[in-house]
Amino acid sequence: MDGLRKTYGDKVAVDEISLRVHEGEIFGILGPNGAGKSTTVESIAGLRVGDRGRIRVHGIDPWSDRAPVTEVLGVQLQEARLQAKITVQEALELWSAFYADPEPWAPLAERLGLGTQLRQRFENLSGGQQQRLSIALALIGRPRVVVLDELTTGLDPRARREVWDLVRDVRDRGVTVLLVTHSMEEAQALCDRIAIVDAGRIRALDTPAGLIEAASAATITTFETSVAVDLASLRELDGVTAARSEHGTVTVEGAEGVALAVIEALRTQGVTPLRLRVAAGSLDAAYLDLTETETDTETRQEALR
Amino acid sequence: MTSPTVAVIRTESRLFARERLSLFWIVLFPSLLLGVLGLIPSFREDTADLGGRSMIDLYVPVTVLLSMIMAAIMTMPPTLTGYRESGVLRRLGTTPARPSSILLGQLLVHAVAVAASSVIVIVLGRLVFGTPLPESPVGYVVAYVLALAVSLAIGSAITAVSPNGKAGQVVGMVVFFPSMFTAGVYVPVEVLSGTARDIISFTPYGAASNALNDAAAGTFPELVDLAVMGGWAVVLYLIAVRAFRWE
């Protein structure tokens, strides 16, 4: 994808996004809601045509050759449902009829844990089952690339893990996976490489480990207080890269050993930290570094007061 | 391997067979109405004012049009706006199947349901109340096909201009009652005369009513009525095609 740009009216949804997804990897597009993620994948699927830029999926231009793209690209769209009264089996059979050489649907359904649900109507399936059916349909045409948009939204933790295992399975069979998510946990657990997108632009593109290393926070210290904390003095501590307060929870990011310095500083301020936690840096920090949202700015202003 | 379009149409037929409420309004309700009206003794008497026909004779074409109204205005637009809102159309757009095949499927299943309803109404009228069969079969078929085409055009236009299901319901209701009136559900169009009749004759169902009644009575429908239906159908399909949104 090269220089994709797409605007709706005066709103710029995607602003010059360029990226290259390697064959056989799980590539994550991570970003807050409204960052332009869905517009990006919908452009890849040929559902939208960008104002500028160029996209190739295995050499095919999805904007001018939409039909051939549908043969190599399986898509699971965010919040796209099926007909309420269609049964699992009917949906699988219908999708099988769309492709010249579909994967046999029965073993696929079995593998996705839908084997006992074949006669169930779509409207009666649980959220997790609907999601798994949607993934099955995305895979049935033996795609070489599969796009999964917000695939675990609304799933309970167990269903989420199951779906994750499935995605790894798909990758291990040699299918390239383009995963769109706003869950950092999901991106960290699954992706080989991640592009962090915000306000229609790519803010960073690296492996999960690379993103964490590059982040300003190797450790994250959080605590709650009932009284105001002098954030400015915390920021001046050695090794601290950021300190912010959100709804009474203070988060301090920085190098190793920052936690001890913070506790010391709080004691001199006469503040008792509650629910003190020290955690290793995660993708969260990298993400927060890179996606400046309005709430961040607000918190900063709050901190200055 | 069946073609994607055929597979989509087959699926839509199956799904439609599960919509009991739609089937009731399209297939059963018109026959029920005819049956209930037929129980009124005076409706079964031939009247000189009606050209020697009985009220129940006039209600056969009316109930034929009623099933078209039910299908095209009451059941098809909500199904299609629902497909659009829930992302069914968008999802289909990512497969080798054309999303338009689902629209075609819906038009077809509704047309078939209406045809079934019409056969039941005509046979019921004939067997139970002795209403005459259409005396100009060719004229009847021509009028019928045009009436069905204009009905589905109305439904398509409603679907296209409604940004969502709620708006679709409002637009549907606004179109529904005038359609019922001009089709003669409240008072058969044949009974009316003068300016009211002339105005109604320029509406799709007024023209349809004239044409079906002419054909039932044995004359070929007047060209003006056929032209009114055809004109409406063309205009409404153009509106539908221009205004339609996939999402």
Image: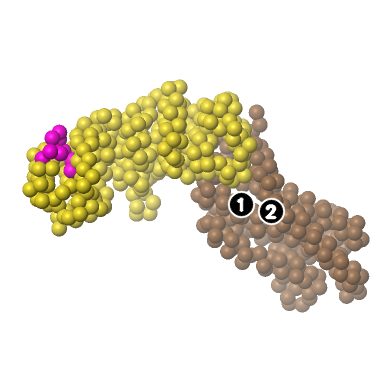
User: Hey, what amino acid is under mark 1?
Assistant: Thr
Residue A208 horizontal/vertical position (percent): 29, 31
Residue at (74%, 73%) from the top-left corner? B198
Residue at mark 2: chain: B
Q: From the image, tell me which residue sits under label 1.
A: B79
Viewer-nearest residue: B200 or A277: A277
Residue at the (78%, 50%) spot, across then down: B116
- Judged left or right of residue B196, residue A247 is left
Of the chain colours in the picture, the one used for chain A is yellow
Element class at badge 2: helix
The reply to whether the magenta stretch includes residue A52 is no
> Per the image, is A256 magenta?
yes
- Local crowd at mark 2 within 10 Å, few (<14), some, or many (≥20)? many
Identify the residue position indicated by label 2 in the image.
Answer: B22
Which secondary structure lies at badge 1? helix
**Left or right placement of residue A174 versus residue B193 in this view:** left
Instruction: Give the residues in magenta.
Output: A252-261
Residue B135 seen by the camera: no
Q: What tint does the image give chain B?
A: brown
Q: Are marks 2 and 1 in contact (CB under 8 Å)?
A: yes
Which of the two residues, A30 or A113, is positioned nearer the viewer here?
Answer: A113
Of all residues shown, which one is farthest toward the bottom?
B194
**Where does residue A119 sit, x and y in percent of width and height?**
63, 37
Tell me which corner region of the image, top left, top right, bottom left or bottom right, holds residue A289. Answer: top left
Chain letter for the residue marked with disc 1 in the picture:
B
Residue A240 occupies which quadrant of the picture? top left
* Residue drawn at point x = 40 percent, y = 33 percent: A178
Which circle, 2 or 1, is nearer the viewer?
2
Q: Give the spatial CA distance, label 2 vs label 1.
A: 10 Å
Q: Number of numbered discs present?
A: 2
The x, y position of residue A106, in whole percent, is 59, 27
| N-term mark: 2 or 1 | 2
